[in-house]
């Protein structure tokens, strides 16, 4: 018998042109917003001006924090919190891709919490206690990647300690998530591919995790099917709004799946790579994912067989185990189709760094390691890295 619970306190608004509702929604929370974003794309596309204009029409003033970097750092979070307090804002708007989502969540809860963001990292003094609330947060995602717009995890990098950690807290949940597929059409092909593959791995890992449940399975299966159907289309033609809508929906479903099912070895191995090499998240994941599928399909043959099917395996006459073994092969076919078949060597990783990466993973990714079915000790982790070079 299954035993599980799920919570989704975030109001999700999905649809083309749903961004037009941001002023009306913002009025629920006050008259001054801090918009958290990176420095370029939202300005160049005109999206920032559009959002500021919609807010202004509803009597809402905007302050802008545009210092978010890929893999947002503790320094970025501190800067955003300082500006939120200086401007005395009533609520936060996260505008952009996964990094903006992560940063906006951390800024929202650190704006009302004691101590420093580092105090909430694993093993630090407020890790067990967690934050003490959060400012209201509206997330507006412009990529289909992290699923962060509707879950409780804020991924933050401590550059001094070479730690990239997913800070999981109930205060990380956005208040409202606006998911407008039209906002993703200008994302370049390589970023579309990398973020879309992140969606796939979120769904895949939640599906085969120890914490998987019927709820997460439904979300994960639907998300993987949508990625298989539409990622290559979105990479080939960014203006294909149906493909973009499929990927936006897959992104949200996969984000909900990992919120409750968690991630496994793929994320456990990739986070240290991003921490040390500042690699794009989806690329670091793609470098190690085929190796994981190759070695771990026997830990849940029916589910890995289903993954192979969702990735396109329709070969007749295969046993469940033979089909499960094909999962890695069909993932590689998808990677090649979207021109993202890469290795850790391509990202700059050398064999002499594997020991460091392995130890870092066991220090910072204990949750994902413990959530992985099968044996994942030092030797297995080391081998995953080595075979992915």
Image (tube, rainbow, N blue to C red):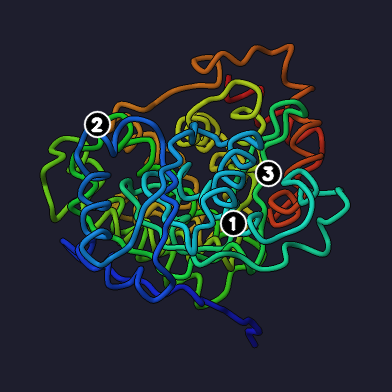
Residue receiving disc 1: 153
Q: Which residue is painted at 49% across and 15% down in the image?
A: 346
User: Which quadrant of the structure image shows residue 161?
Assistant: top right
Along the polypeptide, which appears first: circle 1 or circle 3?
Answer: 1
Is disc 1 placed on a helix, strand or loop? Answer: strand
- Pointers 3 and 2 in contact (C-beta within 8 Å): no
Q: Is residue 344 left or right of residue 358?
A: left
Residue receiving disc 3: 165
285 relative to 17, above or below: above
Q: Which residue is painted at 74% across and 11% down in the image?
A: 352
* Circle on res. 188: 2
Q: Is residue 315 visible?
A: no
Quarter of the picture containing the N terminus is bottom right
Location of residue 17 in the rendering, given as x and y in whole percent from the top left corner: 16, 61
Location of residue 89 in the rendering, given as x and y in whole percent from the top left corner: 50, 58
Q: Is residue 376 left or right of residue 252?
A: right
Is disc 3 placed on a helix, strand or loop? Answer: strand
Location of residue 278 in the rendering, given as x and y in whole percent from the top left corner: 56, 24
Q: Marks 1 and 3, how far apart in space?
A: 9 Å
Q: Nearer the viewer, residue 326 or 104?
A: 104
User: Which quadrant of the structure image shows residue 333?
Assistant: top left
């Amino acid at each position: 018998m299954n035993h599980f619970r799920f919570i989704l306190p975030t109001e999700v608004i999905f649809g083309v042109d749903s961004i037009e509702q941001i002023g009306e929604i913002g009025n629920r929370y006050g008259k001054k917003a801090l918009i958290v974003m990176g420095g370029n794309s939202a300005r160049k596309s005109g999206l920032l001006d559009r959002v500021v204009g919609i807010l202004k029409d509803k009597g809402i003033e905007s302050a802008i924090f545009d210092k978010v970097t890929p893999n947002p750092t503790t320094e970025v979070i501190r800067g955003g919190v300082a500006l939120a307090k200086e401007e005395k804002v009533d609520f936060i708007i996260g505008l952009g891709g996964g990094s903006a989502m992560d940063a906006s969540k951390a800024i929202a809860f650190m704006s009302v919490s004691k101590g420093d963001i580092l105090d909430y990292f694993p093993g630090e003094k407020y890790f067990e206690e967690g934050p003490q609330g959060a400012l209201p947060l509206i997330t507006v995602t412009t990529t289909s990647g992290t699923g962060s717009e509707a879950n409780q995890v804020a991924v933050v990098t401590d550059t001094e300690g070479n730690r990239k950690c997913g800070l999981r807290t109930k205060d990380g949940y956005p208040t409202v998530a606006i998911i407008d597929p039209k906002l993703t059409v200008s994302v370049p092909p390589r970023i579309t591919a990398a973020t879309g593959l992140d969606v796939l791995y979120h769904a895949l890992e939640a599906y085969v995790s120890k914490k998987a449940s019927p709820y997460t399975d439904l979300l994960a299966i639907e998300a993987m099917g949508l990625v298989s159907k539409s990622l290559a289309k979105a990479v080939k033609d960014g203006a294909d709004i149906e493909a973009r809508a499929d990927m936006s929906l897959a992104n949200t479903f996969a984000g909900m799946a990992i919120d409750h099912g968690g991630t496994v070895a793929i994320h456990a191995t990739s986070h240290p790579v991003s921490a040390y090499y500042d690699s794009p998240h989806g690329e670091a994941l793609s470098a190690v994912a085929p190796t994981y599928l190759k070695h771990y399909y026997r830990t849940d043959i029916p589910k890995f067989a289903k993954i192979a099917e969702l990735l396109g395996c329709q070969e007749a006459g295969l046993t469940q185990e033979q089909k499960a073994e094909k999962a890695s092969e069909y993932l590689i076919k998808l990677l090649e189709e979207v021109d993202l078949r890469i290795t850790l060597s391509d990202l700059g990783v050398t064999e002499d760094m594997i020991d460091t990466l392995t130890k870092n993973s066991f220090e910072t990714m204990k949750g994902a390691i413990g959530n992985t079915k099968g044996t994942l000790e030092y030797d297995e982790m080391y081998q995953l890295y080595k075979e992915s070079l």
